[in-house]
Amino acid sequence: MSDLRSEIFSDSGGGSSYGGGSDWYAGAGNSGGFGGESFQSSYGEGIGGVTGGPVGGYTSYGFERPVEEPTFSDGIGGANNGYDDDYVEPPLLEELGINFGHIYSKTSSVIIPTKSIDQEILDDSDLAGPIVFALVQGVCLMFSGKLHYGYIFGFGTVGCFSVYMILNLMSQQRAIDSWRTVSVLGYSILPIVVLSALTILFSLRGPFGLLLAFIAILWCTQTATRFFEAALGMRPQRYLIAYPIFLFYSIFGLITVY
């Protein structure tokens, strides 16, 4: 065994050769291995006097260097841990579907009945405004001594669903989804919300208060009807659209006055 080992690894002038200098050995000097492959050791000096780096693993061809871990370059010279720098995360409000530009446009369309309505505004189903308006109306009524949160959200849910069903049954060309229906009805309730704020200052249980309530209901009805007829293309049927919407806002007018 010692003779075989000395035959395999024999020192030849600072180098190492295999097989006693067989003719398929291609290395010379300080290289040793099979077919020109180098034996390397993780210790200071390699086999046969070869100084090598860290050992990655031993195979049939000898010791290999460790494979370097791949890195993801950010194009500047650093590493970005695999993330794409071109991706820009959208703002939180945009992910939640809250667009202040659309909220302002819809609110101004309610305040100014003659203002033109863009198609982009009609396709928007923003619910942030209606929720805020409903909460503000409840707070105003609470300050006037009326705790009507249950009535507001209860009648609002049932009324929006009823208007949604009626509009889709009446429309022959287009359809409207429930979220857009809630959005339009919720934004158009703004005049009644203002009426609710007036109840904090004085009572509306008189002729003047009833007149203000009737004007607010008509304002809400005209605004919502204008939105729906533009979204569904039902200009000739606008009075049929206005009737159930008038009944819907009359409930909130009665809640506000009484």
Image: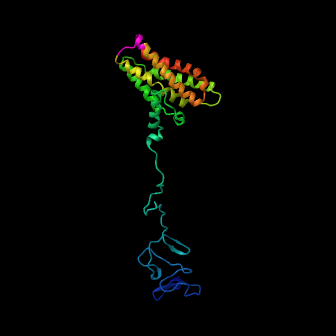
**Whether residue 194 is situated above or below residue 120 in the rendered picture:** above
> In the image, is residue 49 part of the stretch drawn in magenta?
no
Q: Quadrant of residue 132?
A: top left
Q: Quadrant of residue 181?
A: top right
- Residue 240 visible to the viewer: yes
Residue 78 lies, in percent from the top left, at: 42, 62
- What residue appears at the point 44 percent right and 37 percent down from the top-left corner? 100
Q: Is residue 57 left or right of residue 143?
A: right
Which quadrant, please, contains the C terminus? top left
- What residue appears at the point 42 percent right and 23 percent down from the top-left corner? 193
Taking the view exactly as shown, the residue that stands out farthest to the right is 172
Residue 162 lies, in percent from the top left, at: 56, 22
**Whether residue 142 is situated above or below residue 117 in the rendered picture:** above
Q: Is residue 232 left or right of residue 208?
A: right
- Residue 177 visible to the viewer: no
Q: For the magenta stretch, what is the residue range?
A: 202-209
**Coloring scheme of the render?**
rainbow
Residue 81 lies, in percent from the top left, at: 45, 57
- What residue appears at the point 46 percent right and 34 percent down from the top-left corner? 105
Q: Nearer the viewer, residue 41 or 167?
A: 167
Residue 248 lies, in percent from the top left, at: 52, 20
Taking the view exactly as shown, the residue that stands out farthest to the top is 206
Q: Nearer the viewer, residue 204 or 69?
A: 204
